[in-house]
Amino acid sequence: MNAPLLKVENLRKYFPIHGGVLQRVVNNVKAVDDISFDINAGEVVGLVGESGSGKTTVGRTILRLEEATEGGVQFDGTDVMGLNTADLRSYRKRMQIIFQDPYASLNPREKVRDILTHPLRLHRIGTVSEHDDRAAALLEKVGLSRDHLDRFPHEFSGGQRQRIGIARALAVEPEFIVADEPVSALDVSIQAQVINLLEDLKTDLNLTMLFIAHDLGVVEHICDRVIVMYLGRVMEIASVADLYARPNHPYTKALLSAVPIPSPGKRRDRVILKGDIPSPINPPSGCVFRTRCPLATEDCANIVPPLKSVGEGHTSACIHTT
């Protein structure tokens, strides 16, 4: 079996909280707390969970837009965390990101031509005379036209701006993309168009992708496997088919129970979680989900449940499930 393209091992990302006259570190926001997973070449893996689970921080830390507190990230056998500035730039060509907000992620002072050719100039891809043709080809790939090259971002709708953001991510022909909730800021009708676009690009370009989302209905259509996160930790990992047919972790079951069934008259049995997600500054001891879990017992406060196999390629972090 081939080695995974991306390997994340025991990744932690804590944001320090400063206080007092001397502004010393008095506590930490534990955004990501000891998570591990692999992504194979050509695979699209969904990373899901409620807001505040640490999903975006995982994506940004993998790309070193945020520096990890502990842990390792290997990309194609290379330790990304150990790269110096010069080597990291060459690796950024291989790893790109699609940002969540299509309004904030594009420079309002730059025309689309400059937005798309800047990565080409930075990484010295092609000649200057070829850049305009490359930019036009990128726009056509994402469903826009060459006529859009000389427009500014404010002249586009939200869906069109996200297409431009996708085109920018594809400009340097990356092998791996972090798609950070790329449809959450869009209207429902536009979401479907962008998801279909990403599915087509996945097939045409054999992209490897970490698809971050909080909507499991969206994830089902584009991903091969799913990682479920809660408060900085991984709760469950499974293939899409297995997760949706046989969810194991109580948190996963609660998330799936909220996904509407596209059939009139049919409804799921809702699992309503009590309270809100705890603060990552002071997460619960033991299992971080125990304060909202219907299966919680005293043992859950003392044991940090490891991911255990509950089926082929299916792991779950709960001491009460089999």
Image: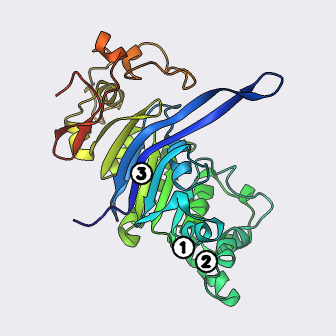
As helix, strand or loop, the secondary structure at mark 2 comes to helix
On residue 19, which mark appears?
A: none
Residue 35 at x, y percent in the picture:
41, 41
- Residue with the mark numbered 1: 140
Determine whether label 2 and label 3 are within 8 Å by CB.
no
Give the amino acid at mark 3.
Answer: Val
Q: On the rendered structure, is 102 left or right of 206?
A: right
* Quarter that holds the N terminus: bottom left
> Residue extending furthest top?
298
Q: Position of residue 41 (x, y in %)?
A: 34, 65
- Any mark on residue 136, and which? 2
Rendered image: mark on residue 8: 3
Mark 3 and mark 1: span between their CA atoms? 34 Å
Query: Pointers 1 and 2 in contact (CB under 8 A)?
Result: yes
Task: State the residue in front, 198 or 309.
Answer: 309
- Is 117 rendered above or below residue 222? below
Mark 1 neighbour density, 10 Å: few (under 14) some (14–19) many (20 or more)? some
> Residue at point 69% right, 89% down?
129
Q: Of the residues tagged 2 and 3, which is closer to the observer? A: 3
**Crowdedness of circle 2 by 10 Å Cα count: few (<14), some, many (20+)?**
many
Q: Visible in this render: residue 299? A: yes
Q: Amino acid at mark 1?
A: Glu
